[in-house]
Image: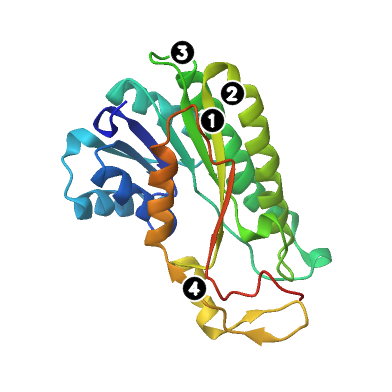
């Protein structure tokens, strides 16, 4: 199917990685539904893209709330009639602190957004993808380098990103019979508002603070588009894209 006939949903679409993915998908001809908490930021992203309103829809969404997610996918189906790609990108962290000091509310907030949100969106996407013609679609999960190795004092974020790997594998297995493919992109230090704090240094495993290299977030958008355009007979199961010189392939 040509890109001009394909439909994508991007969560966390108003800034950073999500915004980059939206821009690349729209430029390639996709119709895109932008989901995020702040309606005005989603509207600004659409305005900036210069794409006609018939190819886009912006929907204020709390991915951790089941009713909000159902509303999102209901509106997508109503406007576009199908769904080919879901990019589960919405994610948050919590303030750095020792694991034993983390308030339950902070833990729950991260789990609800990063893990439950990806699960709820995947559920609704699968319902559409397995019942449309042509059948099938693709779900891309935003993992993280933290899906492999933790940073100090980041238990909630690290745990949810490890869990995203399990979700990705389960979608891949259970989605096979419906021609639904699932991928995970593990990102290391893309330059976004979320990583601006790195300019002041990031805590390392040995207790030091070091400034870590970042890379242009547009390369992540390009990656999302590349995976989206693969035929459903092929899949990139797991992919890591990172700043070449970040301290990941090393002993901490």
**C-alpha span from label 1 to label 4:** 29 Å
Residue found farthest to the right: 100
Question: Mark 1: few, some, or many residues within 10 Å (few <14, many ≥20)?
Answer: many
| Residue drawn at the location 43% of the way across and 51% of the way down | 223
**C-alpha span from label 3 to label 1:** 15 Å
| Residue drawn at the location 55% of the way across and 52% of the way down | 91
Contact (CB < 8 A) between labels 3 and 1?
A: no
Q: Quadrant of residue 104?
A: bottom right
Question: Mark 3: few, some, or many residues within 10 Å (few <14, many ≥20)?
Answer: few
Check the image and tell me how it is coloured.
rainbow
| Residue drawn at the location 27% of the way across and 44% of the way down | 26
Check residue 101 in the rendering and tell me which mark sits there, or answer none. Answer: none
The image shows residue 76 at horizontal and vertical percentages of 35, 28
Q: Between disc 1 and disc 4, whose residue precedes?
A: 1
Q: Which residue is mark 4?
A: 214
Left or right? Give the position of 180 relative to 223: right
Contact (CB < 8 A) between labels 1 and 4?
A: no
Contact (CB < 8 A) between labels 2 and 1?
A: yes
Badge 3 marks a residue whose secondary structure is loop
Q: Which residue is mark 1?
A: 181
> In the picture shown, does residue 56 fall above or below 19?
above
| Residue drawn at the location 59% of the way across and 83% of the way down | 201
Badge 1 marks a residue whose secondary structure is strand
Q: Which residue is mark 2?
A: 175
Q: Between disc 2 and disc 1, whose residue precedes?
A: 2
Question: Mark 2: few, some, or many residues within 10 Å (few <14, many ≥20)?
Answer: many
How many numbered marks, from 0 up?
A: 4
The image shows residue 92 at horizontal and vertical percentages of 56, 56
**C-alpha span from label 3 to label 2:** 12 Å
Q: Is residue 108 visible?
A: no
């Amino acid at each position: 199917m040509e890109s001009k006939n394909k439909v994508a949903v991007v969560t966390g679409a108003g800034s950073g990685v999500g915004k980059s993915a939206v821009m690349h998908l729209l430029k390639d001809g996709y119709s895109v539904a932008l989901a995020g908490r702040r309606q005005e930021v989603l509207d600004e992203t659409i305005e900036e893209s210069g794409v006609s309103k018939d190819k886009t829809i912006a929907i204020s969404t709390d991915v951790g709330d089941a009713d909000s997610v159902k509303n999102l996918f209901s509106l997508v189906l109503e406007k576009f009639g199908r769904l080919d790609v879901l990019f589960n990108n919405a994610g948050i962290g919590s303030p750095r602190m020792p694991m034993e000091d983390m308030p339950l509310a902070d833990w729950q907030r991260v789990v609800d957004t990063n893990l439950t949100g990806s699960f709820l969106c995947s559920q609704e996407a699968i319902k559409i993808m397995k019942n449309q013609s042509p059948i099938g679609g693709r779900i891309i999960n935003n993992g993280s380098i933290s899906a492999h190795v933790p940073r100090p004092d980041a238990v909630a974020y690290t745990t949810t990103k490890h869990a995203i790997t399990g979700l990705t594998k389960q979608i891949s297995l259970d989605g096979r019979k419906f021609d639904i493919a699932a991928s995970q992109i593990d990102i290391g230090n893309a330059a976004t508002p979320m990583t601006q704090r790195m300019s002041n240094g990031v805590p390392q495993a040995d207790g030091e603070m070091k400034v870590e290299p970042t890379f242009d977030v547009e390369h992540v958008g390009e990656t999302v588009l590349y995976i989206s355009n693969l035929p459903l007979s092929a899949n990139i199961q797991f992919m890591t894209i990172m700043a070449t010189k970040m301290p990941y392939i090393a002993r901490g």
